[in-house]
Image (cartoon, grey):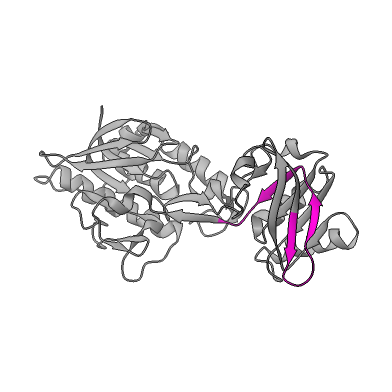
Amino acid sequence: MVKTDVVIVGAGPCGLFQVFELGLLGLKAEVVDSIRQPGGQCTELYPDKPIYDIPAIPECTGEELTDALLKQIEPFSCGMNLGEEVQVVRREDDDTFFVETSGGKQFNSKAIVIAAGVGSFQPRAIRLSNAEEFVDQSLHYRVRNPSQFAGKNLVILGGGDSALDWALELVGTAARITLVHRRDEYRAMPDSVSKMENLVAFGKMDEIRNAKASAIHGENGQVTSIVVQPKDGEAQEIAADHVLVFFGLAPKLGPIAEWGLDINRKTINVDTEKFETSEPGIYAVGDINHYPGKKKLILCGFHEAALAAFAIKQRLEPDKKVHVQYTTTSPIMHKRLGVEDESE
């Protein structure tokens, strides 16, 4: 069993910055996330999309922000437990917490911070009875290896940014792409829609609106065709080697919903002094929490992480006053950050 000061549930930007704020106060952390790489929504949903509202950084991608945060927390040597979900949280007799993950890892922690964004993300599945037999072989909810689609017939289902982005990305290498959207209007960026429409006009790809997949044909995990049913008109069968499904990601609280916390729909109520939940010693920062005036912005989550860190330090050392020390001038901060103290 690993003993630590704090277990942080979630490795998104707020969870990573929480490591930093705790580290400045001399507290060690272990991070657990069900996603197999750090970054949360930034790496799962928009690794290449620009972000413009991070203070002092005019523009960065989700991936660049994640890389910078990982660099920032290097001095604190936190544990990264990725691809695992926290399944058990139990308060012990000494007021610490027993935490166990889906991978069997166990922690004894003095506090817990939930920085799980809007919960764990699961792709919205296509509702066809035999779809499961093709998943990760010729039916995909995420693109992990774009080269496997070279020279293949692709059917892409969806009308958001992911569907349009991958259609535009793969149109030069796939044998043929057919984009199928169940509505008339797309939810993607207007520029992407315009580029797609131009490709259709010049015969570079096909597009079907106001239609949905009604059947998938194939065997032994390999799709051979997909049947598309328009709202008006007859169904048509389209030859396909692979089907890419982008119906979005559905956030789920998962086991967090069973921890006895004060849940507000799919968020967790906290106070605005400590960002503590209804359970003493368990805190929540970022998109997962709720309080009057809450704004789901990364920079707000950073602020919440700072205040939560001070509250946790005070909880662990109730007889000591927690002073604010500035990284610019404090020798203690410099030592914890591993930088040379110029004042010496």
Q: Position of residue 235 (x, y in %)?
A: 77, 62
- Residue lying at the far right of the rendered structure: 202
Q: Position of residue 92 (x, y in %)?
A: 15, 39
* In the displayed structure image, the side of residue 74 where residue 280 appears, left or right: left
Regarding residue 339, the answer to whether it shows in the image is: no
Check if residue 6 falls in the magenta segment.
Answer: no
Indicate whether 284 appears above or below 110.
below
Q: Residue at x 69, y 40 (%)?
A: 138
Report the front residue among 139 and 14. Answer: 139
Regarding residue 103, the answer to whether it shows in the image is: yes
- The image shows a total of numbered marks equal to 0
Check if residue 241 falls in the magenta segment.
Answer: yes
Q: Position of residue 208 (x, y in %)?
A: 78, 63
Report the front residue among 151 and 24. Answer: 151
Q: Quadrant of residue 339?
A: top left
Q: Position of residue 48 (x, y in %)?
A: 63, 49
Image: magenta residue range: 227-248
Report the front residue among 159 and 116. Answer: 159
Indicate whether 108 appears above or below 204.
above
Report the front residue among 56 and 77. Answer: 77
* In the displayed structure image, the side of residue 229 where residue 333 appears, left or right: left
Which quadrant of the rendered structure holds the N terminus?
A: top left
Q: Residue at x 37, y 57 (%)?
A: 288
Q: Residue at x 14, y 48 (%)?
A: 321
Q: Residue at x 43, y 58 (%)?
A: 299
